[in-house]
Amino acid sequence: MKFYRSLKIIIILCFFSFQISAKDEVLRLAIATTAENSGSNRFFLDAIISSFNLILDIDAALFNIVITSLKVSFTAVFIASLIGIPLGIIVALNEFSGKKLLMISLNTLMALPTVVIGLILYGILNRQGLLGDMALLYTPAAIIIGLCILVIPIIWNLTISAVSSTDPRLANTCKSLGATQTQRVFIYISETRFALITAIVTGFGRAIGEVGIAMMLGGNIQGFTRTMTTAIALETSKGAFEFALALGIILLFVAFFINILLQYFQLKIR
Amino acid sequence: MKNLYQLDHIVFNYDGDIFLNDINIKIDKSSIVGIVGPNGSGKTTLLKLLSFLNLPHYGSLFYDGTELMKNNINQFRKSVGYVQQDPYLFRGTVYKNIEIGLKLNHINQKRRIKKVSKILSLLKIEYLSTRLTHSLSGGETKKVAIGQAMVLEPDVLIMDEPFSSLDKDSIYELEELITFLRTELNKTIIFTTHDQIQAQKLTDHIYTIIKGKLFPTHLINLFSGKFNTSNKVFDTGKQLITIDNGVNNLELIAIDPRQIVLSLQELDSSMQNSFLGKITGITEDSNNIKLNIDIGEKIQAIITYKAFSDLKLSLRMKVWVSFKSSSIMIF
């Protein structure tokens, strides 16, 4: 009997001791997991904080990249608007053979991958290329040319849609008031200005967010052709996550600011 | 009087549909011309041709003795002011809208101010000058559009349904303006309307256009409706008219007002159409009497003085209206 009683006590003690050790194990695991989690959280949080610090400190390198990005995008969109808007109005207002083919081509060009534009222009602008003598490759001018090719079809196409959807009575009014072809273009710009602003903003959004052209034609040269998108790609691969994140945040802010402007114009026009 | 417009065998078609078919018309200088006709008959297409907004596909159009060609259409356009049925105004103020034509024609600012204020006072719309166009009523929009066309001082003013969507006062003002433009400024005015009585009151000549064909007379008692071939009855929606001449498909009829017989009792004759109506209007018309009678549809009858006095007709009197099916023109 004594034996059974002693065995019972031993089993109970064993059970308790096992429970305690298991508890320890669970506790240890839990602590470790928490520690790991807090580590990864801290990594992302730290990166965000650092990136905001970078933005607030107005880091010279960062500032330069943002300015380059805005400069090439604005210039390209400005040139593309000067070409795309009048062309869009003229195509929309006139009937000619090949108009349908042109529309299909423009729709195709709107979906053109940026690397393809980069590739073709690289072939033309490199030293052995057709325009190699002009030494444009790896300059902001090369990026601007590439972005223009990217944005012109967008603005052209959206202008055609905007003008085609205007009131047909406008055409009669223009004609009867004796407006010339050039004056009609200006009247249509004025009457469809909100839709045209949308076209320009869409073009700008495409220009500032693209990476293929800037990388292939700009070459990502620091302080010269490094744009926000090429810098994000480079800094992330280098491991400078904070810097890349700072650029990402700025890129988002630019998009946000452009949309605020659009909203403002929309209210003002109405 | 010299012809300002001369249209010879004008044809205008679009996508295989004929919109205007063999139009021949002469319009005198300083005259007021009305064009009446149902919706989709080609009224607007004709006005666009007369405004030189489109070129005819066949036939020749002479303006002031010169034939309209592709190379002189822009020059011709300057002689004409065109006001659309539902005018399009540019965004911005009324003043800017009236001024725009002058700007497009490179008139300097000093002259622009003078001309615009002259038009604003002519149309009595000075109070609208600073208003934004999107806040204007239908009638105000129409007046501004007339101002926009008139500021360029065209010789001809062409208006598509100028009286539609106007209130009574505005209609009166516009009628006054049209008369003033012709008598004081020697302008030629061409307009379309649905209202035959108004057209008669204002114009020197009325033309009726039906399915792209122009009739150089005023077709009175024009009704549109559906024809039932089995019982030979034409349903205008308000009245049933018997037509016995073997046609199968017709949408429009016109009853000659001089062929309508009026009587105090229902006639026992071969006339298939006989309706009891009420006299709603009596007017004198060059040795004849013109009567407006309501038989469900408003119908006009022209009778002689003798018949009028024999029947002792007066306003609101009930009268029998009868006509033969041979006095009905079908389209």
Image: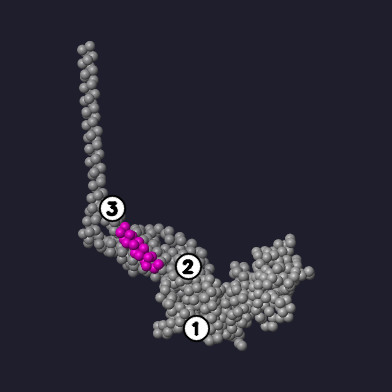
Task: Kindly give the residue lying farthest to the right in the view shown.
Answer: B269
Same chain? Circles 2 and 1: no
Residue B131 placement (x, y as % from top left): 42, 74
What's the residue type where badge 1 is placed? Answer: Glu
Look at the image and tell me in which quarter the C terminus of chain A lies: bottom left
Is the residue marked by circle 3 packed among few (<14), some (14-19), or many (20+) residues within 10 Å?
A: some
Q: Secondary structure at mark 2?
A: loop
Q: Which mark is residue A236?
A: 3
Residue B116 position in % (x across, y down)? 44, 81
Q: Is residue A132 shown to the viewer in this render? A: no
Q: In the structure shown, which secondary structural element does the residue marked by tag 3 occupy? A: helix
Q: Residues within 10 Å of mark 2 (few under 14, many from 20)?
A: few
Magenta span? A251-270
**Which residue does the numbered mark 2 point to in the structure image?**
A166
Image marks 2 and 1: residues in contact by CB distance under 8 Å: no
Residue at image coords 57%, 85%: B30
Report how many numbered discs are placed on residues in the image: 3
Task: Look at 23% across and 53% down and name the residue there.
Answer: A49
The span from disc 2 to disc 1 (Cα, nearest Å) is: 28 Å
Q: Nearer the viewer, mark 1 or mark 3?
A: 1
**How far apart in space, not on screen, are marks 2 and 3 (Cα)?**
46 Å
The residue under label 1 is B153
Name the amino acid, label 2.
Answer: Thr
Chain to which mark 2 belongs: A
